[in-house]
Image (cartoon, rainbow, N blue to C red):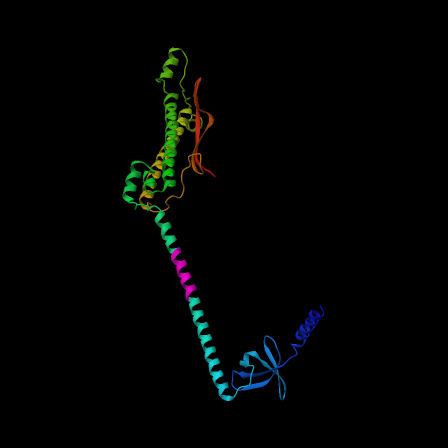
Amino acid sequence: MVLITFRKIVFFLILLLLPAAVFPVTILLREGGKVKGDMVTQNQSTVVIQTESGKRTIYKNLILKVLYKDVNDDEEEKIRIAEEKKIATDKRDAQLREVARKQQVQQQLEEAERLKREEVQRRQAEVPVQDAVDPKKALFRSAILPGWGQFYSDRKMFGVLWPTLMAAAAVASYDKYRVYRNAMRDYGTIGNPYSETALLGGALGVTTFYTPPVLPDPISQYYFDQNYNLIHQKRVEADRDFQHYQDALYALGAIYVLNLLDAYFLAGYGRNLVKASDGKSSGMILSALPSNTGMSNLGSSGSSSTSFSETKYTFGYRFTF
């Protein structure tokens, strides 16, 4: 037990005295020359030795090699040459490793770029190729049926738009024609003693047609005809309604011509912009809403009057999201 304790004491004394021990060394400097002395201490950047002239601190980046023995000039030269070759070899190996690393990084970048190009090509190959659109074929189709040429050129939004506008213009034209026809009927009936209504009223002893008064003064007669004569008013209304009917026909023709120009000149532009919705998915939906505008009175003739009900249609689009 005592022996074990004594050994421990000796071991701890050695550990305590070891840092204070000195070792004879020969330090070869990179720029030439050498320094001899006893090693005192060292750290990561410096070495402290005890020379004959005192303590000297040497930076490790200036040291070529540390020899724990004394060497003559020939041995020093051999060791120096060997160390310089080793340093040069290590430097060349480090450069080769750096070049190899850069080449590997470059190869990895090239491989990533190649994979990226292949992915783009694969995605492009998956996209269906659209056939070239012939503007003449689109024009021919739209001439037969407005919107057909737009559907042929895969412009579905305009394929729905043009027939919708045509339908709206056609409905408006028919409505204007109906109003004009009623106005002409009233104009032909109001002062005609031989109309069916007038003849039926005459058979029953009732006057059903309008007879304007005759005034002795021409100026008064002219003023009356322009402002109070129902026959003149019905003629003005019939002329106005006929002009409205003509304007609606012009609008219908203009829409048809624009449909042809759009089908021919814009056949290859704006494809697949909007798709019509089926009501279950999102998209554009055509909407037509009827509304009753009430009763309209065309005028009266004697004891009878003529009126009809007008219906207004509102055409448009709504979007479901």
Residue drawn 41% across and 64% down? 106
Instruction: Please give the name of the residue rendered at 45% of the width and 76% of the height, measured from the top-left corner.
Output: 89
Residue range of the region highlighted in magenta in the rendering:
103-115
Quarter of the image with the N terminus is: bottom right
Instruction: Measuring from the top left, give residue 246's x and y in whole percent.
Output: 35, 34
Residue 215 left/right relative to 10 = left
Left or right of 70? Residue 144 is left
Q: Tell me the residue at 44%/73% (across/down).
A: 93
Q: Where is residue 52, by image quadrant?
A: bottom right
Observer-nearest of 128 and 52: 52
- Could you say which quadrant of the image residue 148 lies in? top left
Does the magenta segment cover residue 258?
no
Magenta region's main secondary structure?
helix
Q: Image quarter for residue 178?
A: top left
> Which x, y percent locates residue 38?
61, 83
Nearer-the-camera pick, 215 or 212: 212
Residue at the top extreme?
204
Viewer-side residue, 269 vs 312: 269
In this view, 228 is above or below 98: above
